[in-house]
Image (spheres, rainbow, N blue to C red):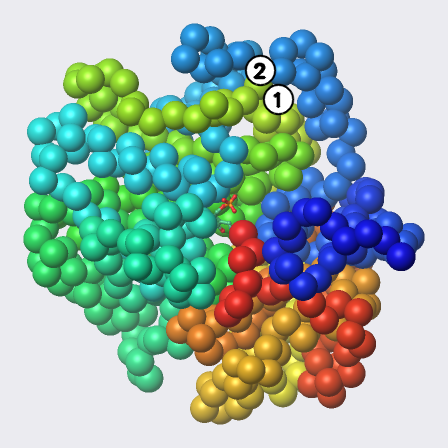
């Protein structure tokens, strides 16, 4: 018998299978089995696995220079990555601060936003407004800004009252019967405005939102004009707009930045998963010129930093990933294959009585399950339906990303399909047909116990 693991896994009760290799969409397990990685982990593996160009870039950089402290030195890959992302100043974003995770990126966004106002002599601005059913990372700052109930729960007692939340833009569950897009968006903009008034408009630093909500609610794109109206509210009150595109950004939803489909630009944007495609832990914030100008005119120093910020090897990996996305025109493939994915999901799952909604953009789609579609009644949370579908899919050789608490943090089940940007139509057909079989098996409760301890994104787990 194997000795027990010394790794603190996500569950102390389960020893997950080891993944030992990967190529394209396929992950290889220690026992020789192959799994199609249909969600790129959590929308991370945008180029798929085993990309030799990225591996070579990492090796070359590690040999040339692995590390130099950013207090004293910059590095070629960090400069080149920032140039590639920002040379054309998309949406007025001119500077990048690179870190090692999406949570660190959101921490940096929150702190930079606060410091912006301190520099401008508005230190009475101490508050952030976020949204329910959102996720901004697992550090305390990220948890406070977000609205992921189960992840927040054990730590609520530590939270600052400087963070509050408004409703998400989640039409499938929260638009009123007969409410038009315009009326719905107006209602949400009024709610945000009222929250500014409630907490004191001159005390708010920023409003934080995922441009397309990822794991918490399952690929929820905003209703048209939502972000335009939200931006107006922020501008009216002199607050910044922080958009968290850690999951939905860097091409995932069919444009390099998800906000490019919304007619707004953020003051600070967080990017993550698709930046380095999982080849290195790398994320970052992209910052508008006016924020940098306030620092330049003030103390001149961002009072924040990490040992591994702008790590040369991480930046070299991200640089190669970003070059490949551009050279191979992969965002175009995201759009083309996104249309195939949506069509295949709608056609194939049309006969599934418990598929309540299919939604998303690009190669970022969720399937939400309901016990009763007519009344939009979810399954009982104890049934852990999404987790069952996830396990049944793994048994059929496909990894998807299950989530629970979709509707309000407790109720609701969904799975996310977020394959690599290199996916082909036949990959998507194979994924969706196995998902279809997995849903049928989960409904019939025909799941072996092999994957029974594998976590899911929702109620009692810690997945990032
Ligand atoms: N923000 C969003 C929108 C995310 O989806 C995630 C990760 N799921 C994070 C922040 C946190 O990123 P990380 O897990 O890399 O810290």
47 with respect to 358 (left or right): right
Mark 1 is surrounded, within 10 Å at the Cα level, by few (under 14), some (14 to 19) or many (20 or more) other residues, namely many
Helix, strand or loop for disc 1: helix
Side (left or right) of 33 relative to 94: right
Horizontal side of 180 relative to 279 (left or right) equals left
Whether residue 345 is visible: yes
Residue at image coords 79%, 50%: 18
Could one spot residue 370 in this view of the protein? Answer: no
Give the quadrant of the N terminus: bottom right
Q: Residue at x 68, y 17 (%)?
A: 62
- Does dot 2 land on a helix, a strand or a loop? loop
Task: State the residue position of label 1.
Answer: 313
Q: Is residue 25 left or right of residue 300?
A: right
Percent x, y of residue 449:
78, 74
In percent of width and height, residue 230 lies at: 24, 54
Whether residue 427 is situated above or below residue 283 in the rendered picture = below
Q: Are marks 2 and 1 in contact (CB under 8 Å)?
A: yes
Q: Please name the residue shown 11% across and 35% down the image.
A: 123
Camera-nearest label, 2 or 1: 2
Q: Circle 2 sits on which residue?
A: 67
């Amino acid at each position: 018998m194997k000795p027990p693991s010394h790794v603190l896994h996500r569950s102390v009760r389960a020893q997950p299978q080891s993944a030992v290799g990967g190529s394209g969409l396929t992950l290889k397990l220690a026992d020789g089995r192959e799994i199609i990685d249909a969600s790129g982990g959590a929308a991370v593996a945008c180029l798929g696995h085993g990309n030799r160009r990225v591996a070579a870039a990492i090796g070359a950089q590690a040999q040339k220079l692995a590390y130099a402290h950013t207090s004293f030195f910059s590095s070629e890959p960090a400069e080149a990555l920032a140039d590639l992302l920002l040379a054309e100043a998309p949406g007025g974003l001119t500077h990048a601060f690179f870190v090692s995770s999406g949570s660190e990126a959101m921490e940096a966004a929150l702190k930079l936003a606060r410091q912006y106002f301190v520099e401008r002599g508005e230190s009475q601005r101490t508050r952030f407004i976020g949204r329910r059913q959102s996720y901004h990372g697992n550090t305390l700052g990220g948890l406070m800004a977000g609205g992921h109930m189960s992840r927040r729960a054990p730590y609520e007692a530590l939270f600052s009252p400087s963070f509050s939340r408004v409703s998400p833009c989640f039409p499938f569950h929260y638009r009123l019967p007969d409410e038009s897009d315009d009326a719905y968006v107006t209602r949400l903009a009024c709610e945000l405005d009222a929250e500014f008034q409630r907490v004191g408009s001159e005390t708010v630093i920023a409003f934080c939102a995922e441009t397309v909500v990822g794991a918490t609610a399952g690929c929820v794109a905003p209703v048209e004009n939502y972000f335009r109206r939200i931006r107006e509210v922020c501008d009216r009150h002199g607050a910044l707009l922080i958009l968290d595109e850690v999951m939905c950004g860097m091409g995932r939803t069919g444009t390099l930045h998800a906000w490019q489909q919304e007619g707004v630009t953020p003051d600070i944007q967080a990017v993550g998963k698709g930046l380095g495609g999982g080849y290195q832990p790398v994320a970052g914030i992209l910052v508008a010129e006016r924020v940098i100008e306030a620092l330049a005119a003030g103390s001149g120093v961002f009072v924040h930093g990490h040992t591994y910020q702008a790590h040369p090897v991480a930046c070299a990996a991200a640089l190669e990933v970003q070059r490949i996305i551009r050279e191979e025109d992969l965002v175009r493939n995201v759009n083309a294959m996104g249309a195939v994915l949506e069509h295949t999901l709608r056609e194939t799952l049309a006969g599934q009585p418990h598929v309540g909604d299919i939604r998303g953009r690009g190669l970022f789609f969720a399937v939400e399950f309901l016990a009763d579609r007519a009344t939009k009644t979810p399954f009982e949370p104890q049934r852990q339906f999404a987790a069952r579908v996830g396990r049944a899919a793994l048994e059929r050789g496909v990894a998807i990303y299950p989530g629970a608490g979709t509707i309000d943090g407790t109720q609701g089940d969904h799975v996310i399909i977020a394959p690599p940007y290199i996916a082909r139509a036949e990959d998507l057909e194979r994924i969706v047909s196995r998902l279809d079989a997995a849903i049928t098996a989960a409904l019939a409760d025909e799941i072996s116990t092999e994957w029974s301890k594998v976590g899911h994104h929702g109620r009692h787990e810690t997945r990032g």
